[in-house]
Image (spheres, rainbow, N blue to C red):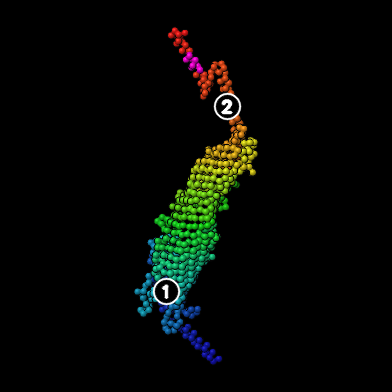
């Protein structure tokens, strides 16, 4: 046991000697050395206030009082960095040999201010101060330069970082900052791990810089960066530099945790369209960020809601607005509705939505995009395979469709949304071979017309809501459809029986062709040339459709086709009026009575005229020539009689018998 007693005694003596060494060591010199190293690394004065206390556990070294690092002379605050204290670790082996060597520095409670001036200067643009020896340091211990600065271990805890960009008018604050790193070789690779809270959301960081010195000098060097917040992750492997800012590499991101991203961004993220990341969103792309701020994404592959978007995008800074340019291909896309009531409600008779449509985002940037999609759900209109171009210029978007599939046919033309002064929408669209029932049901809530045909429509509407736009709509339209049926009305049955009850469920009108032209003024579509050809009747029509009020006021003029024996041919007007979701349909029997009275009057007048002509022939010998009426014949007969009498008188005067 004697060897154990000697061992314990030796350890106690060693601890005593170490403690005595720490107590007696030049603590101010250690603090000044740390200050010199900070000044050397930053080019700014580092002030260590208060007493410097020795520390044996958990790290051999010293603890300082409050620390301040001077800001740039143009900064808004005198200090760029303030900290509660520094914990400075020392190399035991070097200390036993009489050399003070710093192995680690822990900064407790730092408050770091990063500022960008309006003219572009930044306060973290630091210059080394290797030519001036720090106060109190021996000439032989002059502060080392950048290339000799090393650190076995560095740590920051309980920190705060504030970033203020006065040129862009932006400010970001990071709380509860924690960082840990080491600098074994200032010119070599350095790894960093850390975390912070942004707007209460925790963000974790990991980074590896291939050459720290070159990176801090603003030069481009290798970078492996990773960020994690909530369930969202981002990684970048490539090269980067910040004087000027340049990045090139491969970017991967999972952006599905939108609540975490919204907290970090400090604003609400709007609901994304189905197919654009409403539920899940991840991307993989080549990234290029140049010195002018242009961002280019190449070989872009986005996984969104189970679908994929591929292509390329460019974000190019401009004098007035940035430009988004690209070519994208995607699967099924469903654009979001502003509310559950955004679709037309004609069936319920509640009118069009009156909520204000916000198109302010159109002025944020310009765009030149080519889009290809397997299908697009616009809410009220659904398209199949679609290829379109989007040109956005000063808050005016022009969407051009080329052979877009929809409702069994093809759609071509332009649709314009102009947000420069309020909101206006317009278009010039051609629909070929479309199935009218689903189209009219989706657009206007009218599902009674079953037929396929062509439609051409030009329109312009102004207003900040769908209701206002439709109430002020102007334009024109032409429609022509082939064989089909109109449900809810049996025109032939009404004509045969003069019974207005041939309406409602189960009633329908079969036709061969239907065509109509429409002029739209102040939200009212007027038509005078409706033409329907059917197996049992032919019809014309005229009237108005109030698009804003969803009302009809139309007169249909059908005539039964005559039978082989010449009978039939009855014509009776059908009046259609009221809400187009549930119109009132009735026979215009008053018109029929007036028409019959007019016909009876015409027949009576014709009979009287015939009798007069007969009496004129019998009594006066007046016979009307072809194309001559009775009055003309009488005048001609009187004139002829006068001429004959004048000839006889002249003969007597000349002595002729």
Image quadrant containing the N terminus: bottom right
Residue 202, percent from left and from top: 52, 66
Task: Depth check: give the residue in front, 405 or 147.
Answer: 405
Q: Is residue 341 above or below residue 492?
A: below
Task: Depth check: give the residue in front, 508 or 127.
Answer: 508
**Residue at the image position 48 percent from the left and 17 percent from the top:** 639
Residue 479 seen in render = yes
Q: Which residues are magenta?
A: 637-644
What residue is shown with label 1?
Answer: 188
Identify the secondary structure beneath mark 2.
helix
Identify the secondary structure beneath mark 1.
loop
How busy is the neighbourhood of tag 2: few (under 14 within 10 Å), some, or many (20 plus)? few
Q: Is residue 325 above or below residue 101?
A: above
Residue lying at the far bottom of the rendered structure: 2
Q: Looking at the image, is mark 2 or mark 1 earlier in the sequence?
A: 1
**Residue at the image position 60 percent from the left and 41 percent from the top:** 509
Distance from disc 2 to disc 1, alpha carbons, whole Å, reads 111 Å
How busy is the neighbourhood of tag 1: few (under 14 within 10 Å), some, or many (20 plus)? some
Side (left or right) of 193 relative to 601: left
What number is the disc on residue 140?
none
Q: Is residue 230 above or below residue 452?
A: below
**Residue at the image position 58 percent from the left and 41 percent from the top:** 511
Q: Is residue 26 above or below residue 597?
A: below
What residue is shown with label 2?
Answer: 602
Closer to viewer: mark 2 or mark 1: 2
Q: Is residue 385 magenta?
A: no
Residue 97, percent from left and from top: 42, 84
Task: Depth check: give the residue in front, 287 or 33.
Answer: 287
**Residue at the image position 40 percent from the left and 68 percent from the top:** 220
Residue 631, percent from left and from top: 52, 20
Task: Depth check: give the residue in front, 368 or 147.
Answer: 368
- Quarter of the image holding residue 32? bottom left
């Amino acid at each position: 046991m004697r060897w154990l007693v000697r061992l314990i005694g030796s350890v106690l003596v060693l601890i005593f000697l170490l403690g005595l060494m720490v107590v007696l060591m030049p603590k101010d010199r250690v603090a000044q050395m740390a200050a010199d190293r900070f000044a050397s690394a930053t080019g700014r004065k580092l002030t260590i206030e208060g007493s410097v206390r020795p520390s044996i556990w958990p790290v051999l070294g010293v603890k300082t009082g409050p620390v301040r690092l001077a800001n740039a002379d143009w900064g808004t605050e005198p200090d760029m960095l303030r900290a509660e204290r520094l914990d400075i670790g020392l190399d035991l082996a070097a200390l036993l040999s009489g050399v003070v060597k710093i192995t680690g520095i822990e900064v407790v409670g730092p408050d770091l201010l990063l500022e960008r001036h309006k003219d572009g200067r930044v306060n973290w643009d630091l210059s080394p101060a290797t030519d001036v020896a720090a106060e109190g340091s021996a000439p032989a211990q002059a502060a080392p330069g950048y290339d000799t600065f090393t650190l076995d271990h560095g740590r920051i805890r309980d920190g705060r970082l504030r970033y203020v960009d006065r040129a862009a008018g932006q400010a970001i604050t990071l709380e509860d900052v924690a960082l840990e790193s080491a600098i074994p070789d200032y010119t070599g690779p350095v790894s960093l791990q850390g975390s912070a809270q942004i707007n209460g959301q925790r963000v974790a960081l990991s980074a590896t810089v291939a050459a720290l010195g070159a990176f801090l000098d603003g030069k481009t060097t290798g970078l492996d960066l990773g960020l994690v917040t909530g369930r969202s992750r981002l990684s970048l492997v490539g090269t980067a530099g910040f004087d000027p800012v340049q990045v090139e590499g491969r970017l991967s991101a999972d952006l599905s945790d939108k609540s975490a991203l919204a907290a970090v961004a400090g604003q609400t993220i709007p609901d994304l369209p189905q197919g654009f990341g409403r539920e899940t969103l991840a991307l993989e792309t080549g990234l290029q960020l140049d010195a002018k701020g242009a961002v280019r994404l190449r070989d872009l592959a986005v996984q969104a809601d189970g679908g994929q978007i591929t292509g390329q995008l460019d974000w190019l800074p401009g004098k007035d607005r940035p430009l988004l340019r690209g070519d994208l291909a995607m699967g099924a896309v469903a654009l979001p509705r502003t509310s559950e009531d955004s679709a037309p409600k004609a069936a319920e008779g509640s009118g069009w939505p009156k909520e204000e449509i916000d198109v302010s985002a159109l002025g944020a940037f310009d765009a030149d995009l080519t889009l290809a999609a397997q299908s697009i759900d616009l809410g009220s209109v659904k398209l199949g395979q679609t290829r379109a171009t989007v040109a956005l210029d000063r808050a005016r978007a022009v969407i051009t469709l080329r052979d877009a599939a929809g409702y069994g046919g093809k759609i071509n033309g332009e649709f314009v949304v102009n947000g420069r002064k309020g909101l206006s929408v317009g278009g010039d669209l051609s629909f070929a071979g479309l199935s009218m029932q689903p189209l009219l049901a989706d657009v206007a809530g009218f599902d009674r017309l079953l037929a396929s045909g062509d439609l051409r429509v030009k329109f312009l509407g102004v207003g900040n809501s769908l209701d206002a736009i439709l109430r002020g709509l102007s334009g024109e339209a032409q429609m022509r459809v082939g064989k089909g049926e109109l449900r809810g009305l049996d025109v032939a049955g009404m004509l045969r029986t003069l019974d207005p009850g041939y309406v409602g469920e189960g009633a329908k009108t079969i036709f061969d062709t239907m065509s109509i032209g429409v002029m739209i003024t102040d939200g009212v579509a007027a038509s005078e040339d409706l033409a329907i050809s059917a197996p049992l009747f032919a019809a014309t029509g005229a009237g108005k459709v109030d698009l804003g009020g969803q009302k009809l006021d139309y007169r249909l003029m059908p005539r039964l086709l005559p039978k082989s024996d010449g009978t039939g041919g009855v014509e009776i007007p059908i009046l259609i009026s009221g809400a187009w979701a549930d119109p009132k349909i009735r026979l215009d029997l008053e018109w029929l009575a007036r028409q019959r009275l007019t016909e009876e009057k015409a027949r009576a007048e014709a009979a009287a005229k015939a009798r007069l002509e007969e009496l004129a022939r019998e009594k006066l010998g007046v016979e009307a020539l072809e194309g001559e009426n009775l009055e003309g014949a009488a005048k001609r007969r009187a004139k002829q009689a006068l001429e004959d009498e004048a000839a006889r008188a002249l003969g007597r005067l000349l002595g002729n018998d």
